[in-house]
Image: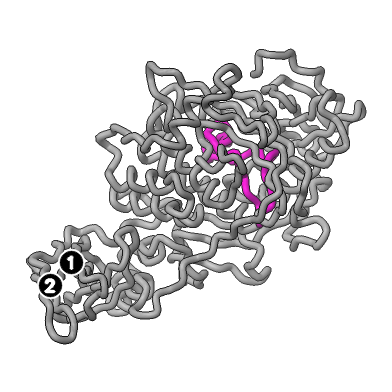
Amino acid sequence: MNAKRTPMTPPDLPGFTYVDILGSGGFADVYLYEQHLPRRRVAVKVLLMDRISTTSVAEFTAEANVMAMLSTHPAIVTIYQAGVAGDGRPYLVMEYCPKPNLQVRYRREPFSVAESLRVGIQVAAAVETAHRAGVLHRDIKPANILVTEYNRPALTDFGIASTTSAAAESAGLSIPWSPPESFADVPRSDQRSDVYALGATVYSLLAGRSPFELQGQRNNGVDLIQRIETMPLASLGRADAPASLQHALERAMSKASVDRYDSALAFGRALQKVQIELSHSVTPIDILDDHVPDDAVAEEDDGLTRVRGVVSINPETTPAAGYTRPSATTAAVPPRSDPVAAWADPVVSETVRRAPVDETVRPAAAAASAPELGETLRRDPVALEPEPSEPAAPSATGRSRKALWVSLGLAGAALLAVVIGVSLPGILNGGTASPQQTAAETSEPMNPVAGGIAAPTDLAGAAVPDGVVFTWTNPKPEEGDRYAWGLVTRADEEPSFATIDEPTVTVPADPSGQTCIEVIVVRSTGQYSDAIRECAP
């Protein structure tokens, strides 16, 4: 609870009985009430009396609508009701999450790798759902991830969220988990800014500290901003954390937004890959998408990504009524030029306002008034054009890895259906796949690729008149083995794969003077080896 002020007297709400104070911050108090009908304990967030203004009420309404639109997702805190108390204070009635939030937990001790991956994937699914609904969260951090009675993470505090199409930038930020572009003279945020904050949050759970917090050194806001902008991400330093997990976090938290995963979904799939590498059960990615028809349920990746239609909730409805479609006037949050409320963190930190952009806090100028670690800061609006993130165009040659595995799986489909019940294709391509219908759904798909398939050896290339011929050796061949190969055009991207029966392929020479390919052994059972890569002049 915020020690800087005494919480205000809880409002008298018809149909509710006050129980206790849960937390307070710079813009709101959060109380525990018992609702009479249906009988349950709820968290009630109440705007402070001295914060009430025309703008504040509009911002409160915007938060209520955003949370109502998204809160049917299992990893987003549910909103039950919204209204104005008899004394004029607006309030939100929300799901009560009694367990400590993730910031409280990771400061006690770091999370296990298994739990960090599970939480990261579930919250990534929630953020992807918000993005598909046109909403940026913009304040993802461990303190804003509560834990339900069923031990599921629940993202909350959409008070500084905005529509992705908004013409004005009103950015709030919590310094330790904010990307470098948040501190620019003209700050900006987009979907990849939320991806950065997701990566920073998962890093914090694993490291037991925020990403650029250094033990034994000053860690005020000015110091953190300088490190976020210039310092490489430090290694987790955990023997149980594989290199692939460190790589996923580094990519999610790249200094330049174009180098990050292009969506929360892509980051979630990268974490699924780590789960498979560690032989963990794979956490499904649940996505609500209002483009899914009412009478259809779309599936992606054989149960690893599950897409459902969005349920729109009118904040005045208690409890929320039925499966509905957004209306033109109530579903989408309209673009706003006024700042969006930075609602208080109900447990940990106070929310404070940041100076206008022409007084941007910079390391040299802000030493005397450096913000405290974990505080959420406010920016005043700055008009700028949104930067839509466009998906990479598909390769004109070859087949995607997903198409490859689908075609290869035909030979062993009967065996796979009985033994494992799920295939791997969608999460191997690292990007967004088209929704597909599947015969069955499994909530905990098992790893279909384990089995110690030996990788190819002796991969080598030589120039020939019509290109470059590559050859390799299958060290432990079995009947039915085939080979997947793909041209490597960029070191940081996976190639598109095609399949052949023989351990050799001739490819066109790359104009750069160096031609590179990857090769994988593919077994008739659907298992495959690690990829090897080689380049030839």
Please tell me whether residue 31 is drawn above or below residue 513 in the rendered image: above
Locate the C terminus and report the quarter of the image it occupies.
Answer: bottom left
Q: Is residue 42 left or right of residue 250?
A: right
Residue tagged by mark 2? Answer: 461
Q: Is residue 186 left or right of residue 16?
A: left
* Residue 375: percent from left, percent from top: 60, 26
Residue tagged by mark 1? Answer: 535
Give the CA separation, mark 1 to mark 2: 7 Å
Secondary structure type for disc 2: strand
* Residue 403: percent from left, percent from top: 37, 75
**Which residue type carries mark 1?**
Cys
Q: Is residue 293 left or right of residue 201?
A: right
Please tell me whether residue 38 is drawn above or below residue 49 in the rendered image: below
Q: Over which residues does the magenta segment extend?
A: 134-163
Image quarter of residue 535: bottom left
Which is nearer the N-term, disc 1 or disc 2?
Answer: 2
